[in-house]
Amino acid sequence: MSAFFHENYLWFLSLHIISVISWMAGMFYMPRLFVYHCRLEVGTEAYEMFMEMERKLIRIIINPAMVFAWIFGLSLAFSQDLWGDHWFQVKFFIVTIMSGFHGFLSRWRRQFARGENCHSERFYRIVNEIPTLLMFAIVFLVILKPF
């Protein structure tokens, strides 16, 4: 571990945790917005308001938080040479899945913006649970390091 990183490790760790919390807050909230948004008629004032809320959530909170979570997380991984640890490899894979889910949220938001949502309220209620399940797996891997 470089001297700079060693001296600033707790700053990197703190910023990583803050970024992950912010990212996850958005990942929990966006599908919930979609649940209510799909009830609305395209072009109504309420529909437009949800589009604006979703656009701001993804662009101002979720996207930057994900980028910073990756930057600080990779910095921590490289500084501790975690790449050979099996728990970390599984965690990395799950975080990659979380990033893919993030991509789906972005795609669904754009579909709403075009008035082309093709999923039901039930669909969004179900996918709303995905980030929670992934988060449980990630936290248990990081804390317990089971293998």
Image (spheres, rainbow, N blue to C red):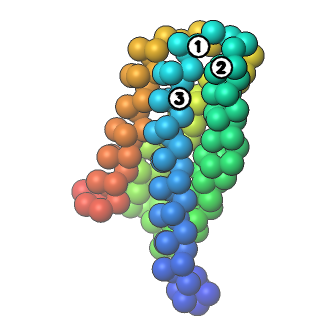
| Amino acid type at mark 1 | Leu
| Amino acid type at mark 2 | Tyr
Depth check: give the residue in front, 34 or 82: 34
Depth check: give the residue in front, 32 or 67: 32
Q: Residues within 10 Å of mark 2 (few under 14, many from 20)?
A: some
Q: Which residue is mark 2?
A: 47
Where residue 123 sits in the image (x, y, percent)?
Answer: 45, 16
Q: Residue at x 48, y 47 (%)?
A: 24
Q: Residue at x 41, y 22 (%)?
A: 125
Q: Residues within 10 Å of mark 3 (few under 14, many from 20)?
A: some
Q: Which element carries disc 3, helix, strand or loop?
A: helix
Q: Are marks 3 and 1 in contact (CB under 8 Å)?
A: no
Q: Residue at x 75, y 16 (%)?
A: 114
In the rendered image, which quarter contains the C terminus? bottom left
Where residue 81 sits in the image (x, y, percent)?
Answer: 49, 70
Query: CA gap, disc 3 to disc 1?
Result: 11 Å
**Image quarter for residue 118?**
top right
Q: Which residue is mark 1?
A: 40
Where residue 111 sits in the image (x, y, percent)?
Answer: 68, 18
Q: Residue at x 61, y 87 (%)?
A: 4
| Amino acid type at mark 3 | Leu
Q: Residues within 10 Å of mark 1 (few under 14, many from 20)?
A: some
* Relative to 32, residue 82 above or below: below
Q: Which element carries disc 1, helix, strand or loop?
A: loop
Tell me if 39 is positioned left or right of 91 in this view. Answer: right
Q: Which element carries disc 2, helix, strand or loop?
A: helix
Q: Are marks 2 and 1 in contact (CB under 8 Å)?
A: yes
- Residue 96 at least partly seen: no
Tell me if 36 is positioned left or right of 111 in this view. Answer: left
Q: Which residue is mark 3?
A: 33
Tell me if 141 is positioned left or right of 70 in this view. Answer: left
- Residue 6 at least partly seen: yes
